[in-house]
Image (cartoon, coloured by chain):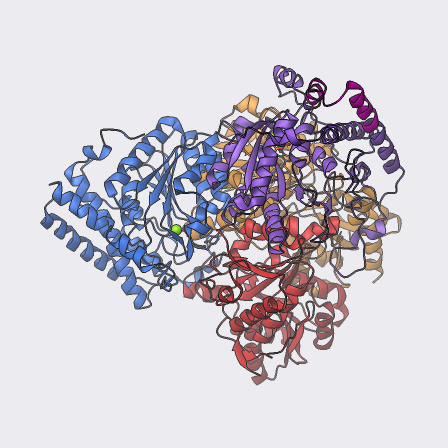
Chain colours: A purple, B red, C blue, D orange
């Protein structure tokens, strides 16, 4: 299935910088969240995607702006890539009344549903019940098709979550209906404390697609351009009507399941081995050695994203908690209760439209 | 006005809503060429094509989950669960995903999940359930169950046009047994409004679905011993029409709660609570529940007859109640 | 995976006759049920396995007597093979008080749970919710292993039922735990009215096992000895600790989903093509041409099974319906309410023990 | 007697039952080396090995389904649902398979399905549920929820020894907040028996789980205005201890039903029905329900505080009730 000409060869310099920017921003937003967490400003758990920012960005970057994304808790990179303003994330984690869920739901559980023809991403955050977003993603892509659209839906799912019945029913349904769905199955070696060996009896996570007649391929999840290349091919195929595709991502969860989890069940050696493969550091090298960017440009981006994340966090901190009076509002349609839209932004590297 | 069956009324509602609104589509098992296990969707695929009448795999989670996704994209999916008993397989999708979506992110889920419920036809433990109590503790969902052909059509149209997820339970015992006048022109029966099926002064029989007919039987029998029963058809189970319930009890001072599901943990509890909380001063007698036995639904006719509420059981309970 | 020496070569003449007997008996019991159905003595629907008796018998015949079977509505052949007395089936279909479910549950929904060490089959009939018996079957085999037993569990499942989340979760769990479970996935071309093409996007149903690392293979379901050979290999491997196995059966449902269904959605040509491959007729030819049996022996068996089925049906007809008073008995443990055991019988061809 | 936490008491019950009975094993997500999301099973795998402490894939249907199968083979599986909210994913296995098995074929299903329920810890819509009402209309299941460490241990031992499927809800708010005397020697708390936590004559607060402590707070506050509240801890939700409920109401003539689940369609309905049916003559005032708001469980602390029942809300309701 390999092709000689890689899609990434066609990426313009500003696009390469933009990918770097999104990965960096994802990491810096999470670093900020850690600080807020330590200040107990974050309500509930904090889930890091440390070490997985690359695959999140690489996959999402292969989408058209109008496509649909269904991220999980560790896909901060995907959210940054589709242009969710970091402020929205901080609001969510701190349960602010200004957040898309107005403090009603956790972390990245945000939803953006543009008009059918708007050139704007469909964003459907997960519910906690793992696997459920796969049938929903299938429905989104099917629905877009029914309305004459050509949106592809991309749904990320962890190794553990592929063991749910919802994953099976959703992917099988999509395969039968030839729905333009791209599933990104992330083998990050663990589901909470459970090693993948206790989750499935197959060599590679992409084989999870084999029962459905869904094309699948593994990729080194810490090589951002390799991820992008495969994702681009999968997305193009899905959009071309070839039905769902599954990308198997080989990566590593570099911290515990959440901040409370010291992950002592993970062998040190494994962590060291993967630390050497940090996706952002690798991409940096690729860019510099490939001559696509100078070290200084990247240093500037590092500073840019760090400051941006810090400023956004500060803004969110000063925002109010939701009004207790509102607790029963908006359970059903009909009471005039408005919900703030998710603010979308363009990166400094975006091209003019 | 043409007289049609309860089943035909459901089919008409689907035809008319699909014809009137291109966003409406139906999905389920064997609903296409075959027309559904009970032929409710018969002819729909011929008329509207495979893209709007979708035969799904045996995957209730995928049916409801993909309907949620499609509704996010502006469509109006109507899901058929071949027998409503199988709704247990998508309980999570309905209670956790669909029911909470609007509250969490303002993302409405205008889907309808419909299917045949109820017993009396020898269906056994897995083809006879009345699942309303499973969902009554989940805000965000609406539930309706018609007892007449007129309501079957009007409630389904209302459900399809509703902006929130609606569970539409159709009682399979009524499919072909119940016929009444159904207008050909467009109308809806509003969700949340009960109907008084029989005016009465001595007690209120509060019920819905197939049991409405059992209640009316019982009321006729009670008439002969001079007992004048009022029969309230709830039609909507969520939200409940509290006003209708309370004003009837205020009038009769006696409440008999009749439902086909198992007695314990059934909707009768919620009704009893509403009455005991808000109509206490009007009550001249204990609230009485007449419902199925606390057991799985048995299959043999003699067992099922002993299991289900009957007009005779209602009459007995009513007699004791009015004597109280 | 093919082997030169076929397990069926080792089958003794009486065993071959016994397999024929079981298949024949399954068909004749169903023919009787059709008569009872027409007399409206059957309560509820009647589901035929016409054309599938061979695969049911061939797979079940590969089991040891102590093994566990989880049949579905179309596995009458499996029930006859493990020795369920036909009377038990008639009682069930006519909802008699003498039945194992005492008229509380339908058709073949019977259960037999012998003592751990008893050399007697574990039989767990299905519940209507498709797919649910797969996790339960996994638990039965795991439970046997935990108690030091070596029972293999065999669970049959239709093409349609493989689309359920329960199938996925159960088979994956069995694979990870290396549970001695053999799944027989029956491609009989339809799930009710739904063709397999609308159920899955794979060529062969056995690929349903590919996502789990479960060994799988297709077999001509209407060739009883081929089915037996594959099943024997799968059962032996499962018992040897190689984990779950999946047999893909290529067969055809020769009648409607149930008696009410005229199956006009099935192309005539398809039915004719498969009618020519009737498993019992083919097995007959194999036995006669192979010299394993004379036509007359087989004619005798035909008569034997027809009379046996008729006699058993007559016995059941005269049995009482359950007592309405009993409707709330036995919902929980503790009320002294006894349940009749499923009567097991040996075939006339069984060897002395 | 040693004073231990509610959580420790649950762990002790597991240790002791597994040590005493080789048929008992536990299964769930991350319960082995990790010891469970809340560390309830900490140390179990070290002690009893991987074959009796099984880390499962993320497959609630497989966890419960395989437990049913294993129980058929004579084992006594105890399943952990990491957060009880995820029990929705095995709703079918529990209500259709486990609950009906004995009735259908005399095949008992001695399994326990346990997990953390309840709110008050900022868990949000999917980590805070109280699911008892989902299962109350399904005969064949038993349900318990302890409010003390003593009961946590005794009820779990009773559940494991019970021959029918028992849902054991442990309130995560109590895990480490509640400590009390727990005997080291073997004992059980029988399923189906409520406990009087506080004797009183003016009204009966009927509740269970974490709300028992809310009720006791409220009772203390009410004492200051001379209101003497009785607090009944149901402990078992199925079957309910009707005698305990009715005799308390017979004594106080006033019933306040307190539960943490959403108000509509909750267990308070069943309790109200029992009282309105069987204690009507004793009642001097309407039955009152104090419960959570009819909405998904919100995550922000100020919202959750407004959502949940509190001692203050109970006190207000009780004051109105006794004035009635
Ligand atoms: C249906 C369901 N069961 C259990 C859980 C509890 N849970 C939350 S995250 C998690 C582990 C997820 O692992 P994986 O899918 O590999 O994603 P990762 O965290 O590794 O990104 C579990 C068990 C859940 N959220 N949903
Ligand atoms: C979970 C669930 N959904 C739907 C049904 C309704 N139903 C009963 S049998 C059937 C078709 C089964 O087809 P298949 O699995 O291929 O078995 P076959 O009848 O062909 O032997 C359906 C849809 C069910 N029993 N359970
Ligand atoms: Mg993982
Ligand atoms: Mg089939």
Q: Is residue B272 left or right of residue A297?
A: left
* Residue D35 can be seen, yes or no: no
* Front one among B96 and C2: C2
Q: On the rendered image, what quadrant is the C terminus of chain A found in?
A: top right
Looking at the picture, tell me which residue is in the foreground, A215 or C293.
A215
Q: Is residue C279 visible?
A: yes
Percent position of residue A221, x then y: 62, 27
Q: Image quadrant of ligand 3?
A: top right
> Which stretch did the figure color magenta?
A280-305
Q: Quadrant of residue A236?
A: top right
For the image, the number of numbered tags is 0
Give above or below for D273 relative to C63.
Answer: below
Q: Is residue B23 left or right of residue C90?
A: right
Magenta region, main secondary structure: helix
Q: Nearer the viewer, residue D211 or C294?
A: C294
Please state the horizontal and vertical placement of residue C306, each as a whole percent of the image.
Answer: 19, 56
Q: Is residue D294 above or below residue A241?
A: below
- Say which of A112 and B149 sits in front: A112
Q: Position of residue C83 (x, y in %)?
A: 27, 45
Is C274 on the left-hand or right-hand side of D303?
Answer: left
- Residue B98 highlighted magenta (yes or no): no
């Amino acid at each position: 299935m390999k092709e000689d000409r890689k899609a990434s060869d066609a990426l313009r310099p500003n696009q390469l910088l933009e990918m770097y920017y999104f990965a960096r921003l994802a990491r810096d937003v999470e670093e900020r969240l850690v600080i807020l967490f330590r200040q107990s400003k974050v309500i509930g758990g904090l889930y890091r995607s440390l070490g997985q920012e690359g695959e999140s960005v690489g996959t999402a970057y292969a989408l058209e702006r109008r496509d649909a994304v269904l991220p999980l808790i560790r896909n901060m990179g995907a959210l940054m890539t589709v242009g969710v303003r970091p402020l929205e994330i901080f609001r969510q984690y701190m349960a602010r009344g200004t957040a898309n869920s107005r403090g009603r739901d956790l972390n990245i559980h945000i939803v953006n549903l543009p008009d059918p023809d708007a050139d704007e991403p469909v964003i459907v955050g997960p519910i906690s019940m793992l696997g459920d977003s796969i049938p929903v993603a299938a429905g989104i892509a099917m629905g877009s098709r029914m309305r004459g659209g050509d949106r592809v839906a991309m749904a990320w799912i962890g190794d553990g979550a592929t063991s749910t019945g919802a994953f099976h029913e959703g992917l099988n349904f999509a395969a039968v209906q030839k729905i333009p769905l791209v599933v990104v199955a992330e083998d990050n070696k663990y589901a909470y404390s459970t090693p993948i060996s206790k989750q499935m009896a197959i060599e590679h996570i992409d084989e999870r697609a084999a029962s459905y007649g869904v094309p699948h391929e593994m990729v080194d999840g810490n090589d951002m351009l390799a991820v992008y290349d495969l994702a681009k091919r999968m997305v193009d195929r899905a959009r071309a009507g070839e039905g769902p595709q599954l990308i198997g991502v080989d990566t590593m969860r570099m911290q515990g399941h959440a901040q409370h989890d010291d992950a002592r069940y993970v062998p040190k050696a494994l962590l060291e081995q993967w630390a050497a493969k940090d996706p952002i550091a690798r991409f940096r090298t690729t860019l510099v050695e490939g001559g696509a960017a100078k070290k200084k440009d990247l240093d500037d981006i590092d500073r840019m994203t760090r400051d941006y994340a810090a400023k956004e966090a500060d803004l969110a901190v000063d925002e109010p908690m939701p009004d207790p009076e509102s607790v029963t509002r908006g359970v059903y349609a009909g009471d005039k209760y408005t919900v703030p839209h998710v603010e979308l932004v363009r990166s400094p590297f975006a091209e003019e439209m | 006005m043409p007289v049609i069956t309860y089943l035909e009324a459901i089919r008409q509602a689907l035809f008319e809503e699909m014809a009137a609104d291109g966003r409406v589509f139906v999905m389920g098992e064997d609903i296409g060429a075959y027309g559904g296990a009970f032929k409710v969707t018969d002819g729909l695929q011929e008329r509207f094509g495979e893209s709007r009448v979708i035969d799904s795999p045996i995957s209730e989670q995928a049916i409801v989950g993909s309907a949620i996704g499609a509704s996010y994209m502006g469509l109006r999916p109507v899901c058929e669960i071949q027998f409503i008993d199988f709704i247990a397989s998508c309980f999570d999708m309905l209670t956790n995903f669909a029911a909470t979506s609007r509250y969490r992110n303002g993302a409405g889920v205008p889907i309808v999940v419909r299917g045949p419920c109820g017993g009396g036809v020898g269906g056994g433990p897995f083809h006879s359930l009345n699942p309303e109590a499973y969902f009554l503790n989940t805000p965000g969902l609406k539930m309706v169950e018609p007892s007449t052909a007129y309501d079957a059509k009007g409630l389904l149209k209302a459900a399809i046009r509703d902006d929130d997820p609606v569970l539409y339970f159709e009682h399979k015992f009524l499919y072909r047994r119940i016929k009444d006048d159904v207008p050909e022109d467009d109308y809806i029966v509003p969700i949340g409004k009960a109907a008084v099926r029989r005016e009465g002064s001595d007690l209120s029989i509060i019920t819905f679905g197939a049991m409405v007919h059992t209640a009316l039987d019982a009321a006729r029998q009670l008439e002969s011993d001079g007992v004048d029963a009022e029969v309230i058809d709830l039609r909507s189970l969520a939200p409940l029409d509290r006003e209708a319930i309370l004003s009837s009890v205020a009038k009769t001072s006696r409440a008999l709660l009749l439902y086909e599901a198992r007695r314990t943990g059934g909707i009768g509890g919620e009704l009893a609570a509403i009455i005991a909380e808000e109509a206490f001063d009007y009550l001249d007698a204990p609230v009485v529940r007449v419902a199925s036995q606390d057991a799985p639904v048995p299959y043999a006719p003699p067992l099922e007859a002993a299991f289900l509420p009957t007009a005779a059981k209602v009459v007995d309970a009513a007699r004791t109640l009015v004597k109280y």
